Image: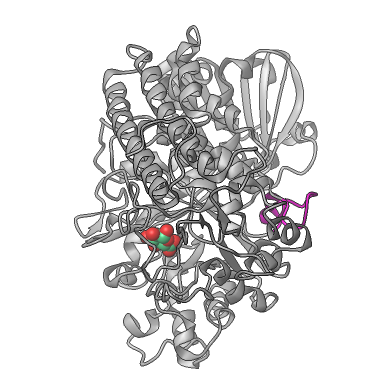
Amino acid sequence: MTGDTHVHPAWLPDAAFAALGSRRTLVIGEGLLVDTVVRELEAACARHGGAVHHREDPPHPHEFDLIMAVHSAAGALAAQAPGDLGTEGYAVARSDGTTLVLAAAPAGLLHGLFHLVRAGEAAFADAHPPAVHRPALARRMLDHWDNIDVHPVMGHVERGYAGGSIFWQGGGLTRDLDRVARYARLLAACGVNAVTVNNVNVHATEATLLTDRLADVATLADVLRPYGITTHLSVSFAAPRTVGGLPTADPLDLAVRDWWARTTRRVYEAIPDFGGYVVKADSEGQPGPSGYGRSHADGANTLAEALAPHGGVVHWRAFVYDHRQDWRDRGTDRARAAYDHFAPLDGQFDDNVILQVKYGPIDFQPREPVSPVIAAMPHTRLAVELQVTQEYTGQQRHVCYLAPLWREVLDFAPWGDEPPTVADVVARSGGLVAVSNVGDDAYWTGHPLAQANLYAFGRLAWDPGADPAAVLDEWIGLTFPAAGGDGTLRRILHDLMDDSWSVYEQYTAPLGIGFMVRPGTHYGPDVDGYEYTPWGTYHFADRDGIGVDRSRATGTGFAGQYPPHWAYVYESPRTCPDELLLFFHHVGYGHVLHSGETVIQHIYDTHFAGAERTVAMRRRWADAAGLVDDDLHARVSERLDEQVRSAAEWRDQVNTYFLRKSGVPDAYGRTIH
Ligand code: GCW
């Protein structure tokens, strides 16, 4: 292993372990993850002067400041932990000068350790009875869109904005496994427990991870495992043909099913706790069951059948649409596609199939309605997919803290105003998945502040009810120990980040219309960039108005894919929320929003305001000079310069476009070109 000492510690700097590392700790229990806990404590104690003991006998409480115990080994202590802790939960109590962390399984102890890291000195302050902490969602997964070979168009990491892959380098497995271990540690500390190590677009070399290159996957799994992270693989549906040498990949062909069964058995021989497969099928050129006249259920179930004896799952993505649409055809609506493909298949998927649904019906836009698929498939296990990598939200050049967006998605009640919410649905079934934003960049995420998005994803997946500002605060406290000082840095970061998603929304595409980005790169404004393309993402602006009519009465009928409450709300501009108006309706520029403003004036106002707010953000960051290390300050400053430039570009292109189309002047006479 080679260690890179220049990697930023993110939310686990040495200082975050000061409180723990200066205590006397007893760890009771055994197993791989308990050893990880002991190793973490030993390292912390070596730096901060404490001591750690590891044994299996009952403890002598008064000898120790901290006792961490796995339930089964803890004998009498077990009685103190209320409720069922599950495999990842833990209880924390403090009495008689001792803090006690109790878990029923080693993974719980590891999460308990990071709980104490977050709490810092507070973990050793006031006495309190046992408090139980359990993840709301059992599956909390990050998908990496990493390629082994650098792709000529998409690069090393598809939609990656933080350098090359941390898993793959030089056409094979990375030699810097220490970096992978650090990543696993960061993920465990925010609550992520599963990772997919390669891109869902599976190219020729990557397809062999399932076969010839399986040893590399096993090596990664060995590094991820001590932090409680299970390894998953993206596989190509055509693998029986392309790497298996069969004449077909027809999921109902017996030889094909046998191939998947044998291949999967070999995977489990190499990786006994392997998580399962992720599949993008019949989408954007990836092969799938439709080529054989079979359904997505046929396809998914064949892989599920191979995984089932080993306890594995298949994450089958619902991101399926026609990317060769004729823009002249107003009848086809990309937003409808996932529901049209999958809702009729509800109930046909095996129990170990998880249908992975993007949170919106189009594609990770800064504002979309929540996907109607979530309410449409009560008999299917569902996972919701988010995008931590900022493909459409500034590509880690713009500050855009995404937790408020994710929280809105998780809080959305698909059947009406009342629970269950999206969080409830995924808690009961497939969990939460996100596309990672990490690369081999020294700050992990290119933009140092984009680390907060990764952290927040893990924390929200553990507790979807967490307050985004509180999560940010937690991240600030861990990442910038100096923020504890007089609170200046903490205030600066909140000022910069709390509302940064709404700032981004203001200066980009208005009122939920989305996709006014440059084709291909998806960075920067290009209002008509996708308008006459086959991709199905149109705004239909003309001299009179803008928006997509997705009503049942006069449009594509997409609004009718929702249960009655939302179908009613979205059907009419009268009831449709302003922020989604142009997603659901084509309206005139003079249409008056619920806010009282006309659509055209709203476009001008938000674009001027958003761009102006980026200037204020940059000014505010100047105040942080000297409060964070100089390199980090410089990196953020340089990105803020780009954000200010880009926001002005967005403002000017969007405002100019709509002034020219509509001929309606800005009510305040500001400069439009
Ligand atoms: O958002 C789009 C991206 C593609 C990506 C695809 C997907 C991996 O532009 O690069 O491919 O989504 O989610 O499969």
Question: Which residue of the protein is positioned furthest toward the left in this rendering?
Answer: 170
The total number of labels drawn is 0
Q: Is residue 173 left or right of residue 290?
A: left
Of 424 and 125, the residue lying toward us: 424
Q: Quadrant of ligand 1?
A: bottom left
Q: Is residue 666 left or right of residue 411?
A: left
Residue 608, placed above or below residue 245: above
Going 69% across and 69% down the picture, which residue do you hit? 553
Residue 412, placed above or below residue 267: above
Magenta part of the chain:
413-428
Where residue 268 appears, as percent x and y from the top left, is 47, 68
Q: Is residue 415 magenta?
A: yes
Going 63% across and 62% down the picture, which residue do you hit? 382
Where residue 550 appears, as percent x and y from the top left, is 61, 65
Can you say which quadrant of the picture contains the N terminus? top left
Can you say which quadrant of the picture contains the C terminus? top left
Of 235 and 415, the residue lying toward us: 415
Q: Is residue 47 left or right of residue 301?
A: left
Q: Is residue 63 magenta?
A: no
Report which quarter residue 286 is drawn in: bottom left
Going 34% across and 67% down the picture, which residue do you hit? 209
Of 67 and 20, the residue lying toward us: 20
Going 52% across and 31% down the picture, which residue do you hit? 499
